[in-house]
Image: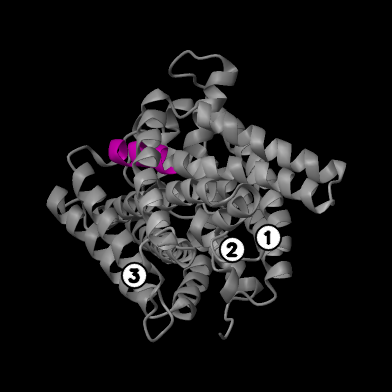
């Protein structure tokens, strides 16, 4: 099989997945916290860097397709591996729905707010269908799209961020605590929301079998991608907060377009909005790509229906891509009864929870495999422990309702595992 993903495309997968709908809608979601959100971004960035370093350690020893699934299976066996992969797969297709909602919100803004709920729904479903088709044409096509959209998306973010920092009102952004929580509780609540913007740190590990010199390429992409995204996030989101009052920002469905309208007028706002669409499409493209790769890995191991292991003439697991896209479309349709920001907030909580759990178990797997292979060092242990601690801290902030629903979804996957394992043994 020809490998087509090098360092730059691998970096683009990490940055392109992380820098998507999160950065473009989170300024609105975090507006109630005011200046305190800066501490949230810095804390989440540091925690994500530890997760990236732990994943890099695993990837350098186990460059296998499936990323988190491959590592947890290696450390804890097929059952734990399946649960982690099943939860991660849920996070992917539910993430597709959240990103599609953000895409529809920015499209509505560019259309002058005239789309209405049905029009936004049509846009969200349409972009899912288009990018599913692109991914069905092969990993190389998808990775080229990812590199181009990643480079293009950074332009509006950096531009608005720099100008916002230089022209914004520094006295207008005050530290807020909307629920009168303790500092630790408030940081935990923000950590889960902000972590949505860092979901995708593991992206370079998923298509490992398509990666050139995976043992070297993947760790470089993980660390460089995390540092790039953190810098862009802090610059861009705080720049928007300096320009738009918190009350107005909290209800905005397109914060960067609103900021650009203040800075550059209608034409500039339209161009920034267009850049946001490119960025969000890039993140959506990556999530759809990974959804197919994840179920491919499971099916190859006999713990997912065999049809998910079948490849088309371009070597693409189309069953996984189409299934995830259909589930995401259903989720989008279900949640368009709520307003856009509320729907987006609820979905990202669920999606983030379902991927933070794999991060936590991967950190444990890192410790187990270090000991098993006899390559433990104090630095490696510290990194894995900090990655685990941050993941647990973020889960605590998700709230009982989200944890309950996430647990139900994981339990729902257990009968599938045992049925398929039983059939595989026969």
Q: Earlier in the sequence, mark 2 or mark 1?
A: 1
In the image, 241 versus 283, the foreground residue is 283
Whole-percent x, y for residue 262 in the image: 40, 47
> Residue 388 appears in which quarter of the rendering?
top right
Q: State which tag comes first along the sequence, 3 or 1.
A: 1
Residue visible at 48% across and 70% down in the picture: 146
Label 3: few (<14), some (14–19) or many (≥20) C-alpha neighbours in 10 Å: some
Q: Residues within 10 Å of mark 1 (few under 14, many from 20)?
A: many
**Furthest-front residue in this view:** 426
Q: Which residues are magenta?
A: 341-351
Residue 381 point in image, percent of width and height: 79, 41
Can you identify the residue that label 1 sits on? Answer: 59
Residue found at x 51% / y 61%: 16
- The residue closer to the viewer here, 47 or 413, is 413
The tag on residue 347 is none
- Residue on which disc 3 sits: 307
């Amino acid at each position: 099989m020809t490998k087509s993903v090098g360092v730059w495309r691998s970096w683009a997968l990490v940055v392109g997945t992380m820098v998507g709908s999160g950065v473009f809608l989170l300024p609105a979601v975090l507006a109630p916290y005011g200046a305190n959100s800066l501490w949230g971004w810095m804390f989440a960035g540091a925690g994500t860097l530890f997760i990236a370093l732990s994943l890099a350690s695993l990837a350098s020893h186990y460059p296998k397709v499936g990323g988190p699934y491959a590592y947890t299976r290696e450390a804890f066996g097929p059952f734990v591996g399946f649960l982690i992969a099943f939860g991660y797969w849920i996070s992917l297709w539910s993430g597709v729905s959240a990103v599609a909602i953000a895409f529809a919100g920015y499209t509505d803004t560019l259309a002058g707010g005239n789309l209405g709920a049905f029009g936004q729904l049509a846009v969200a479903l349409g972009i899912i269908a288009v990018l599913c088709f692109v991914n069905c044409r092969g990993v190389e096509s998808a990775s080229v799209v990812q590199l181009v959209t990643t480079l293009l998306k950074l332009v509006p973010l950096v531009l608005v961020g720099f100008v916002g920092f230089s022209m914004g009102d520094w006295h207008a952004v005050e530290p807020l605590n909307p629920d009168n929580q303790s500092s630790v509780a408030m940081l935990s609540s923000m950590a889960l929301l902000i972590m949505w913007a860092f979901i995708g740190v593991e992206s370079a590990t998923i298509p490992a079998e398509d990666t050139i010199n995976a043992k070297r390429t993947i760790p470089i992409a993980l660390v460089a991608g995390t540092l790039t995204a953190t810098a862009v996030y802090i610059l861009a989101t705080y720049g928007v907060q300096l320009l738009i009052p918190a009350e107005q920002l909290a209800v905005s469905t397109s914060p960067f377009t609103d900021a650009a309208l203040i800075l550059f007028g209608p034409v500039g706002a339209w161009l920034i909005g267009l850049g946001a669409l490119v960025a969000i499409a890039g993140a959506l493209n990556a999530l759809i790509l990974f959804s197919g790769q994840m179920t491919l890995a499971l099916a190859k191991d006999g713990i997912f229906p065999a049809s998910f292991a079948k490849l088309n003439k371009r070597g693409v697991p189309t069953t996984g891509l189409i299934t995830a896209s259909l589930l995401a479309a259903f989720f989008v349709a279900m949640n368009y009864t709520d307003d856009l920001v509320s729907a987006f907030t609820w979905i990202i909580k669920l999606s983030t929870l379902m991927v933070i759990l794999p991060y936590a178990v991967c950190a444990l797997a890192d410790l187990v495999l270090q000991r098993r292979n006899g390559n433990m060092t104090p630095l490696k242990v510290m990194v894995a422990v900090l990655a685990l601690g941050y993941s647990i801290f973020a889960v605590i902030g998700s709230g009982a309702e989200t944890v309950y629903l996430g647990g139900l979804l994981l339990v729902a996957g257990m009968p599938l595992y045992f049925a398929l394992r039983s059939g595989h043994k026969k």
